[in-house]
Amino acid sequence: MTKPVQPTVILGLDEPYVRDILTAAFHARPEIWTAHQLSPTGTDSPADALKGLDPSSDTAGPLIHWLEYEAIDWDRVYQSSAEAPWPLYVNAYCIRKGLIRKAQMAYNVHKYIAKHPHSVLTRAVPSTYILELDHLDYLDEAMDDIYEVNQALAANACLVPPQTKHTRFIMKPSLTGRGAGIHIFDSRSQLEAILATYFDDTEDESDMEAEPMQNLAGPGSLALQACRGSQIREWVIQTYIDAPLLLKDRRKFHIRAYVLAVGAIEVFLWEDMLCLFAAKPYSNDDLHDDRVHLTNTCLQVNDTDFDEARAVCSFWDLANDSAPCSIRDEQRALTRADLKGLFSQIKAVLGDLFDAVTSEVTTFQTRDNCFELFGFDFMVDNQLGVHLLEANAFPDFKQTGKQLRGIVEGLFGATVDIMAHRAGAAQPIDQPSPTKLHSVYRRELLRNC
């Protein structure tokens, strides 16, 4: 029988919110882990923390580096394996752009649906088109490649009152997160105005970088953040979900689900999900009002009237809200059964999505000694259908806030326990199993591809 070992973990994360929670999770299990915290100032390294440890000694065990992606020593990761005398585990997959890059995920989903026409992804992923543009002068040619969008905008232009059935679209840069660069439009002129903010030839690049964000005008300027400038060349355009489920003063919201992927590969959904609400009641009268249409709380935290309790709540607490809402053309409150149905839909979507992206080994490569936490965003329509919006690596856990911090604490605690088991560490008999981690996908891929 293999003798249990005590793994050593090197912690080096920049965000204090996450760093403090993760450090506490390891320190709460001193009989399992030996934890070393790197200086937040970056004055030391994982190698410095390991000085004095003899990898050939009886006390040597597995290593876990829980670091920022850029700080991971990928050469060492690829030289290591779970069978090595002193294996190294890291908190990210080196290649996972097929999941976290919006355009690449859209391509993988489109390819998967073509092979699996009955997949839940056919209805759970909004129609998605990829816009590639080097300069605004070439927009006509680029629009030819997304014919459906072009035709829909032309049809919108032909509508006259009382006709109001506009097809609306939402556009996002392929590589950004946290609500950056999101725009909604329903006309060609609006699209051109949005793109003009990215291709401004009147300023050089250094001027744009130095300009205060509050001086940037135009549609969606609140969310532009660092996206403005010549480096943006690829966007995804999706059909806008303009009949969302509205709760808590008729406000739009999205579900943030945390997902743990381990090894090669098993995927778990954390049961405790979040709901993040827009700041203002929903309306289609002004497509450019970010506080109506965007639900990312990181866009609201600097508002003088920001109220965390109003902006974020636990998913399961929605059943405690007795206020009626419009569900399938009737006015009633959400029930626990409704929430369980949404949770089941999310599990099914995640299962097929990981089947889609892990099938493309050039854009998602699994390894036995890797694991990663992802944040997934879902929208719910007024028919209680779930729609996948995007996936994020190194998600912004800080959006959870102070009041619901326990959700993230539970997630990290369960992740620490999962990795202790994989590393062969001794665990207390009375340690509870991580029952809130629901397995949604498992597949034996190439062990270290």
Image (cartoon, grey):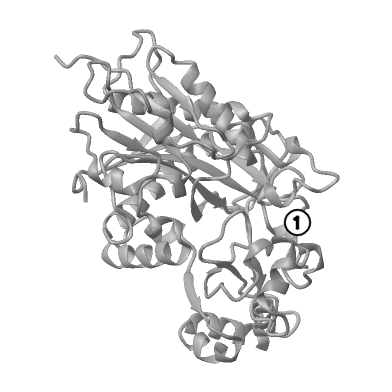
User: 158 and 98: which one is in front?
Assistant: 98
374 shown above or below 389: above
Q: Kindly identify the residue that appears in the image at 47 percent across and 74 percent down.
A: 130
Q: Where's residue 111, x and y in %?
A: 32, 67
Q: Residue 95: horizontal and vertical position, in percent?
A: 35, 55
The picture quadrant where one finds residue 87 is top left
Count of numbered circles in the view: 1
Q: Is 224 situated left or right of 88 in this image?
A: right
**Residue 407 visible somewhere in the drawing:** no
Name the residue nearer the viewer: 125 or 327: 125
* Percent coordinates x, y for residue 71 in the rendering: 45, 45
Q: Quadrant of residue 288?
A: bottom right
Q: Quadrant of the N terminus?
A: top left
Residue 374 visible within the image: yes
The residue indicated by pointer 1 is 291
Position of residue 257 measured from the top left corner of the image (x, y, whole percent)? 51, 42
Quarter where residue 439 is shown: top left
10 relative to 378, above or below? above
Q: Is residue 67 above or below residue 156?
A: above
As drawn, which residue projects farthest toward the right?
304
Amino acid at the residue labelled 1: Arg
Report the side of 218 relative to 12 (left or right): right
Tell me the SS state at disc 1: helix
Q: Nearer the viewer, residue 157 or 259?
A: 259
Q: Residues within 10 Å of mark 1 (few under 14, many from 20)?
A: many
